[in-house]
Structures are given as structure tokens and as C-alpha cells.
Amino acid sequence: MTLKRLGYTALLMGSLFSASTLAADIPTQTLNKSLHDRLPDDVKKTGVLNAVNNGSFPPYQIVNGTHSLDGASADLAKALGELLGVKIEHASVSGLSGLLSGIQSGRYQFALGPIGDFPARQEKNDFVDFVREFVVFAVKSGNPEKINTLDDTCGKRIAVMSGGSAEQVIVKQSEACTAAGKPAITVQSYTDQPTSILSVRSGRADAFFSSQAPLTYFVEQTNGQLELAGTGQHNGFNDLYQGSVFSKGSPLTPVIQAAYQQLFDNGTYAAVMKKWHLSDNMLPAPGVNLAK
């Protein structure tokens, strides 16, 4: 991700929340020695967990620099690090495929996410899910192309995140369009949210199909230029769980799940989600590989 994009994202997201909102108190955690002792030996030796992200995914992840992260995920990472007695360091890569391959290769130990949990991804990865998400459209104000459902996207230019689950749904929908004798969808794949939003604002795309939580915040900052469409529908998805990602069978998975559970139990998780206006995305408890 370029410094220009990073700066744009930080500036955009900086205007989303008032100083009083961002000053919400997040409890400091006390070291849980039993959880610390369950960490892999190399992690206990270095005192560091290497986490990877694939760019800004506000309000969960707001990338401010190569190794700097803000947002709900950053607050959760800080709490997890305090609880486990380690430092969680953040690295950014371009695109979801780069993130997953980095975990598979062992370059990174996990991705805090949240990343979409799907059965196909569970073949090579394990997920500790901590939120539920919805997928909708960001369109120009007034919805001039009348995009309210997947069926309305035939012949339209739809922006998606490269390598993401929404891209797979739109590609499948395009095949359904042509099978029904309708025009194919022009799928525009981008590696980050800001560029995708700009494609709609500039008229290069008719809609951006992505997660509702970040789209809500981006739309609010367009001064009425964009609005949400297709809300309250499945839009090609079943229950959509998202969470932290690990390589299959990683010894970290049960430890991080237990750490999340403590954050759920002691109110830290709820405080973080409320701070970033994500209460509607909360789960009652974290779970491993919840997608079926």
C-alpha cells in the first residue's frame, strides 16, 4: 500500500470519530500466566507475535504506517498482547491472497482480521471468529442504477476487494447473468477499500460490493454523494462470520480463542466494539471455524 493511500485512509478515518468517541476507555489487561505458558516456545522466547493485515479495513483496521495500526482490531490486539504478556507487531501486505500465503509460509503467525470465515478457507486455515458481518452495496446517492439485489448487477460495473469473498459472489453472479441471457457484470477488483470507494465516487464503477461495517463509515464521509443499498438481505451469503486467521492446526488457535473469551467475559470486547460503533456486529462468544 502506498504512503499516499495510507495518508488518505488515515485522514478519511480521522474525521469519522470525535475526540470524545476515540477517548473511550478500554480496560488495561492483567497478564494471564496460564495463557502465556500455553504459547509456543518461540513466542515466549521472543515475546513477540507477528500479525499481518491486508491494508485498511475500517473501522476494524486503519493502517497508519508499515507497522502501525488503529481501529477496533488494534484495540483488541493491544488487549490480547497485555493478556498474553507479548507484543503483537503488525505488518501490511497487498491483498488477501498475500495475507493467506504469508501465514501458510510461516512468515506471519496469524492475521488478527477480521477475515471472512468460509468452509473452503478452513481447508488450509483455522479461524477464531469474533464478529458477524453483512455484505451490501455502496452506490451513488439516489441509486441511479437501481442496484438493490444481486439480480440488479447484470451489465453493471461492480467494484470488489481482490481475493475476497464478495469477489467470488459477484463472479458467480456474472455467470448466472449470462446463463439467463443477460449482460455479464464488469468486475473491478481492487486491493484496498479507499480505492474501491473512489471508483464509485468518480463514476468508474456503479457500486462497491463489500462488508457493511466499513461501507457505513465510508459512505458517511462522502457528504451525501454515496448511500448504502441492498441492506437487510443475504446478497449471496449465509451467516457471515469473520475472525482471526491461523495456519491449519496452529498451536496458537486455542490460546487466542481462550484469550478472546476472557476479553468477552471481562467486558473489554464489548467496550471496543461500542467505541468503534460495531455493537450490531458482536457475537455472544468467540468460536473456531463457525462457518458451515
Image (spheres, rainbow, N blue to C red):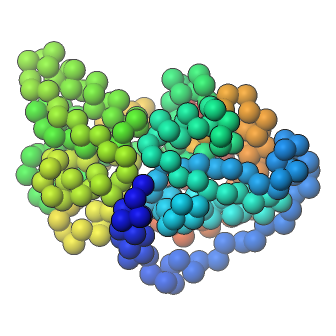
Which residue reaches farthest top?
179
User: Is 42 placed above or below 203 here?
Assistant: above
Determine which quarter of the picture holds residue 78: bottom right
Q: Residue at x 79, y 43 (%)?
A: 255
Depicted 15 relative to depicted 89: above or below: below
Residue appearing at x 8%, y 51% in the figure: 144
Q: Position of residue 208 (x, y in %)?
A: 26, 48
Identify the residue at horizontal 14%, vertical 27% (top origin): 184
Quadrant of the image for the N terminus?
bottom left
129 lies left or right of 205: right
Q: Is residue 166 visible?
A: yes
Residue 8 in which image quadrant: bottom left
Horizontal placement of 81 versus 61: left or right? right
- Residue 161 position, x and y percent, is 35, 43
The percent coordinates of residue 62 (x first, y second) are 48, 62
Residue toward you, 22 or 96: 96
The reply, left or right, for residue 162 in relation to residue 105 is left
